[in-house]
């Protein structure tokens, strides 16, 4: 009928509530099932405020029921579970806290008679809360009516595993670094309640354990893989003891392998392989129905690829070879896919083994021509090989990267949509030039930038240069070597690119650092001009809140100017990021600070995913 017609329960008067009740009762005979359906539609709408909208309906129904006592619109367990689901799908820490609050209301029914503390963002940007007592909690009103309300509305709303699993999803989507600990505590509480009451509705099952493992994988905890493995061991032990509700499935094993791959511990690849082998044994023995699949193997490959340890890329390729040979010989039914190859190519690319990456690309292309379309190279494959060239010490690496980019265009123009170059393709080729001593590289990268802009203007989707492309061009100009004429050309290109960045208002700390280096290195004959340009650039950088470590590094190379610009913040001869005004550093996005002590470490990492 339209839930927006409902009045705001925090501001309605008794007459307004009566009016809303009339709307409910004349709304084509709608009962709680209809309203649960409306709330479920909201919960699955992917709207950012879905949780608050669903709870608004729930609270309104509670108010209507308390006023009129009509059981047909009394919220039930499904109502509360749907609101928890709505908050879970919204994502964010506030949504997770509100989901936990809803579960608390189900655990403690008296909270239902208090206006909820709803966290949100007010017009002024501050978090707002409200906590308004209702007459029933104050003992006002008819005692018999209050007892009747409590009995009827609270009869069937105690939490079950659906409630808890939805809350676990909320923690997984919250980004809360303590989410894993909270999830395990909830799991333990569920087990305690089941043991005490024998209520099977609250008994944890495979979905519950999988949800907790997922939370560990999402929270970013260093030892998430280890904690996930302990939960899997617990599931297996309990299943062997006769608890059929916690039988591990493919999601259980694959999630643990995934978490091990992402925790970057030295022994992660070995442990991930051990879990895969254990999964295979458990399947063959009939203990579980979960058979290793390509997702399982890709997760193990990812563990080796992300390790970075000596020999791990080779081990990843050996696993891939084993799968490939077994499938070709008819001895196995798991066929490597494009993701399998992309992972191994990326492993070789990250350590600069370009020939290995190119060989795998050729292998994929050859198999695709023979009809194995599931290994047909895609743009991520080509970008990974381009990345390998950008890491290569081969003096011709930038030319070879450019040649691969041209091949991608030819394949795309020939009808291969999977080979269509994207922004990352261009920026990676630009990086290959940037890191080289290739003569005229500033002109080459500028040509690539112009080509991107032209493609964008012609309507090619995803071709608009972003700040990473502009920063890469600036970096190539800043690292120009050779004759003065070449340096002057690089400087002019750098000025043009910097002005375009400023016009678009997209500058970041890397772009500022690269431009400062450009000014520092390429203006050698006029120091006053150089210092004026650096000073003005640094001031603009401060205004934009983009003073990062790379910017400070460029200024440190000019001691007099460094002191002149940063003297109030120099302690023991150095400037630390945390000593600078917050407004100078507020928009530096990729620094990671160690908050213990005055000295801090700054790590810059680039994430590659398949």
Image (spheres, rainbow, N blue to C red):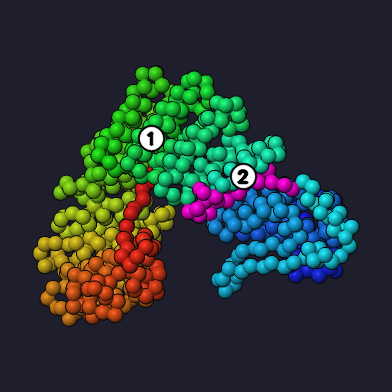
Q: Residues within 10 Å of mark 2 (few under 14, many from 20)?
A: some
Q: How crowded is mark 1: few (under 14 residues within 10 Å), some or many (20 or more)?
A: many
414 or 368, which is in the foreground?
Answer: 368
- Helix, strand or loop at label 2? It is helix
Q: Is residue 529 left or right of residue 592?
A: left
Q: Which residue position holds label 1?
A: 271
Measured as percent of width and height from the top left, residue 97 is found at 59, 57
370 or 136, which is in the foreground?
Answer: 136
Measured as percent of width and height from the top left, residue 274 is found at 39, 31
Q: In this view, does 559 lie to the left or right of 199?
A: left
Residue 322 shown in magenta: no
Q: Quadrant of the N terminus?
A: bottom right
Q: Is residue 65 visible?
A: yes
What label does residue 452 carry, if any?
A: none
Q: Which residue position holds label 2?
A: 189
Depth check, mark 1 against mark 2: the one in front is: 2
Q: Main secondary structure of the magenta part?
A: helix
The residue at 51%/32% (across/down) is: 250
Compared to residue 567, the image places residue 62 above or below, namely above
Can you tell which quarter of the image residue 509 is in? bottom left
Measured as percent of width and height from the top left, residue 196 is found at 68, 39
Q: Give the range drawn in magenta.
A: 157-182
Compared to residue 559, the image places residue 324 above or below, namely above
Compared to residue 45, the image places residue 258 above or below, namely above
């Amino acid at each position: 009928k339209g839930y927006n017609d409902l009045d705001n329960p925090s501001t309605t008067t008794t007459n307004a509530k009566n009016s809303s009740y009339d709307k409910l009762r004349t709304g084509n005979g709608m009962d709680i099932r209809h309203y649960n359906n409306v709330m479920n539609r909201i919960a699955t709408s992917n709207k950012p405020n879905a949780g608050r909208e669903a709870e608004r309906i729930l609270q309104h129904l509670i108010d209507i029921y308390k006023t009129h006592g009509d059981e047909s619109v009394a919220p039930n367990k499904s109502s509360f579970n749907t609101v928890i689901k709505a908050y879970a799908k919204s994502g964010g820490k506030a949504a997770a806290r509100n989901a936990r609050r809803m579960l608390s209301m189900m655990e403690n029914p008296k909270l239902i008679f208090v206006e909820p503390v709803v966290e949100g963002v007010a017009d002024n940007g501050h978090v707002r809360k409200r906590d308004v007592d209702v007459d029933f909690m104050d003992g006002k009103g008819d005692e018999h009516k209050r007892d009747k309300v409590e009995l009827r509305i609270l009869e069937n709303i105690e939490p079950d595993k659906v409630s808890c699993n939805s809350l676990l999803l909320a923690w997984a989507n919250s980004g809360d670094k303590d989410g894993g600990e909270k999830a395990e505590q909830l799991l333990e509480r569920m087990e305690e309640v089941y043991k005490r009451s024998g209520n099977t509705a609250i008994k944890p099952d495979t979905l519950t354990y999988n949800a907790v493992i997922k939370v560990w994988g999402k929270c970013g905890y260093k030892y998430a893989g280890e904690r996930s493995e302990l939960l899997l061991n617990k599931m297996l032990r309990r299943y062997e003891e006769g608890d059929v509700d916690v039988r591990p499935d493919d999601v259980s094993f694959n999630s643990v392998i995934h978490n091990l791959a992402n925790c970057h511990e030295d022994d992660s690849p070995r442990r991930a392989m051990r879990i895969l082998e254990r999964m295979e044994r458990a399947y063959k023995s009939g203990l579980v129905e979960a058979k290793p699949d390509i997702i399982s193997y890709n997760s193990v490959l990812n563990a080796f690829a992300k390790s970075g340890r000596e020999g791990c890329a080779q081990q990843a390729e050996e696993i891939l070879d084993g799968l490939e040979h077994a499938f070709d010989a008819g001895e196995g039914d798991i066929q490597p896919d494009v993701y399998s190859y992309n992972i191994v190519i990326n492993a070789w690319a990250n350590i600069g083994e370009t020939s290995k990456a190119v060989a795998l690309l050729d292998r994929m292309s050859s198999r695709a021509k023979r009809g194995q379309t599931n290994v047909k190279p895609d743009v991520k494959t080509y970008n990974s090989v381009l990345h390998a060239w950008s890491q290569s010490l081969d003096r011709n690496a930038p030319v070879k990267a450019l040649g691969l980019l041209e091949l991608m265009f030819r394949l795309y123009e020939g009808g291969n949509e999977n080979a269509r170059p994207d922004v990352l393709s261009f920026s990676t080729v630009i990086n290959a030039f940037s890191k080289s001593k290739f003569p005229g590289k500033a002109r080459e990268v500028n040509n690539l930038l112009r080509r991107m802009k032209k493609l964008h203007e012609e309507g090619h989707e995803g071709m608009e240069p972003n700040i990473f492309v502009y920063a890469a061009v600036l970096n190539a100009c800043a690292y120009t070597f050779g004759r003065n004429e070449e340096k002057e050309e690089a400087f002019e290109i750098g000025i043009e690119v910097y002005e375009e960045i400023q016009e678009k208002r997209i500058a970041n700390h890397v772009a500022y650092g690269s431009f400062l280096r450009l000014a520092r290195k390429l203006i050698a004959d006029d120091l006053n001009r150089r210092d004026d340009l650096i000073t003005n650039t640094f001031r603009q950088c401060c205004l934009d809140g983009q003073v990062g470590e790379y910017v400070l590094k460029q200024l440190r190379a000019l001691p007099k100017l460094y002191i002149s610009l940063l003297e109030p913040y120099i302690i023991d001869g150095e400037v630390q990021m945390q000593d600078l005004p917050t407004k100078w550093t507020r928009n530096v996005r990729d620094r990671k600070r160690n908050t213990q002590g005055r000295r801090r470490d700054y790590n810059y990492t680039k994430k590659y995913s398949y």
